[in-house]
């Protein structure tokens, strides 16, 4: 059966989308495998790291602000936070600034997980994107244009 794309039937590597997803899968797989060793998923890492980052400048971080920065669905972030709360990594409490939202904060155990996980992810990023050497900033600029 013939492949139904005139553009890519002779050269799959001409597909930017295919190349992008292959690169993403390779990068994500490395991160997923390493984070599994410390007992968290990549999504949990993202949520806790964003929460930790936002907590530097906001004492009362909300699920919505985490979801916005991570560009994740609010309901997905809520479910991830529920699991992280059950694991003892974060706590949700009443937000004194906004009674409609909970304030979310990392607990000591969550800070410890981030302290362990962040260098692992940063090393993977350095190894993976390091092949771009002087082009890494341009690559980030292109990614910003896409988002």
Image (cartoon, grey):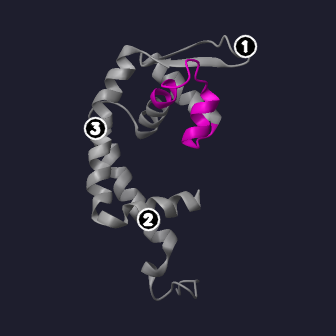
The residue sitting at 33% across, 26% down in the picture is 113
Among the two numbered marks 3 and 1 on one chain, the one whose residue lies closer to the N terminus: 1
Is residue 83 found inside the magenta-colored segment of the image? no
Q: Which residues are magenta?
A: 51-73
Q: Secondary structure at mark 2?
A: helix
Q: Is residue 122 above or below residue 139?
A: above
Tell me where residue 29 appears, x and y as whole percent.
Answer: 34, 51
Quadrant of res 135 = bottom left
Residue marked by disc 1: 99
Residue marked by disc 2: 138
Is residue 65 found inside the magenta-colored segment of the image? yes
Is the residue under label 2 in contact with that under label 3 (CB below 8 Å)?
no
The residue sitting at 47% across, 70% down in the picture is 18
Frontmost residue, 60 versus 30: 60
Q: Is residue 14 above or below residue 74?
A: below
Q: Is residue 2 above or below residue 142?
A: below
Residue marked by disc 3: 119
Tell me where residue 26 appears, x and y as whole percent.
Answer: 34, 58
Residue density around tag 1, few if under 14, some if 14–19, many if 20 or more, within 10 Å: few
The residue sitting at 32% across, 65% down in the picture is 134
CA gap between label 2 and label 1 equals 42 Å
Q: Secondary structure at mark 3?
A: helix
Tell me where residue 98 appears, x and y as whole percent.
Answer: 71, 16
Q: Nearer the viewer, mark 2 or mark 1?
A: 2
Among the two numbered marks 2 and 1 on one chain, the one whose residue lies closer to the N terminus: 1
Residue density around tag 2, few if under 14, some if 14–19, many if 20 or more, within 10 Å: few
Compared across the picture, whether 142 is left or right of 115 comes to right
């Amino acid at each position: 059966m013939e492949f139904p794309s005139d553009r890519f039937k002779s050269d799959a590597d001409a597909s930017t989308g295919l190349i992008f997803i292959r690169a993403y899968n390779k990068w994500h797989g490395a991160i997923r495998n390493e984070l599994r060793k410390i007992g968290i998923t990549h999504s949990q890492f993202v949520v806790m790291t964003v929460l930790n980052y936002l907590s530097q400048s906001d004492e009362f971080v909300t699920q919505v602000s985490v979801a916005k920065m991570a560009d994740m669905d609010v309901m997905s972030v809520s479910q991830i936070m529920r699991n992280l709360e059950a694991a003892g990594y974060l706590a949700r409490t009443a937000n004194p600034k906004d009674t409609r939202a909970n304030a979310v904060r990392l607990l000591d155990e969550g800070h410890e997980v981030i302290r362990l996980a962040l260098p692992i992810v940063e090393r993977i990023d350095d190894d993976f994107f390091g092949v771009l050497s002087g082009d890494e900033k341009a690559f980030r600029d292109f990614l910003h244009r896409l988002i």
